[in-house]
Image (tube, rainbow, N blue to C red):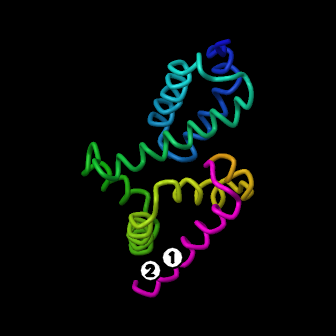
Amino acid sequence: MAIDVEDYYQRYGPMVLRRCRSLLRDEQQAVDAMQDVFVQLLTHRERLGDHGASSLLWTIATNLCLNKLRSKRRRPEDPAGDLLAQIAAADDAESRGAARSLLDRLFAREPASTGTIAVLHLLDGMTLQEVADVVGLSVSGVRKRLRTLKASVAALQGVV
């Protein structure tokens, strides 16, 4: 039986929008991403069951937003606009620049799912078990990725 996408939109739309806002930090992009989440849900509604809806939508929103951020970093739509936004948002330009450089070098070496794991655990405060359930790894796999990430950060900080 197909899920009722309209009902999901009414019930879970605000949660999805909050998630998109927290990751994208841009209202229009967040609204667009929320719509994309429900388009994906609509596209695959025949295959999806009516259980775990909030977790499913949370995961779709997270992955979609992280993919948008990766794509934007690789192919910025308006490089001058990005630069202006970075300058306008910077409290301490040197610190923010160093942090961005560090993160770019760090995540360039890691699988894409490591970024998802880091966001879910470190930013969203999800437990290792919750993160493991979302990304499809074991708890020990998530722990290993975080440990590797921590070691990479330490190594990069030594270089900087």
Q: What residue type is labelled 2?
A: Leu
How many callouts does the rendering have? 2
Can you tell which quarter of the image residue 126 is in? Answer: bottom right
Q: Are marks 2 and 1 in contact (CB under 8 Å)?
A: yes
Q: Is residue 148 above or below residue 35?
A: below
- x and y, in percent, of residue 156 in the image: 44, 80
- x and y, in percent, of residue 144 in the image: 62, 69
Q: Which of 89 and 136 is in front in this view?
A: 136
Identify the residue under disc 1: 153
Identify the residue under disc 2: 156
Q: Does the magenta stretch include residue 139?
A: yes
Give the SS element for disc 2: helix
Give the SS element for disc 1: helix
**Highlighted range, magenta:** 135-160
Q: Which of 70 and 50 is in front in this view?
A: 50
Instruction: Name the outermost residue toward the bottom.
Output: 158
The residue lying at 68 percent from left, 53 percent from top is: 132
- x and y, in percent, of residue 142 in the image: 64, 61
Q: Nearer the viewer, residue 23 or 49?
A: 49
Q: Nearer the viewer, residue 144 or 121?
A: 144
Q: What residue type is labelled 1?
A: Val
Q: Is residue 158 magenta?
A: yes
- x and y, in percent, of residue 94 in the image: 39, 74
Q: Is residue 151 above or below residue 66?
A: below
The residue lying at 67 percent from left, 34 percent from top is: 15
Q: Is residue 43 left or right of residue 97?
A: right
Can you tell which quarter of the image residue 6 is in? Answer: top right
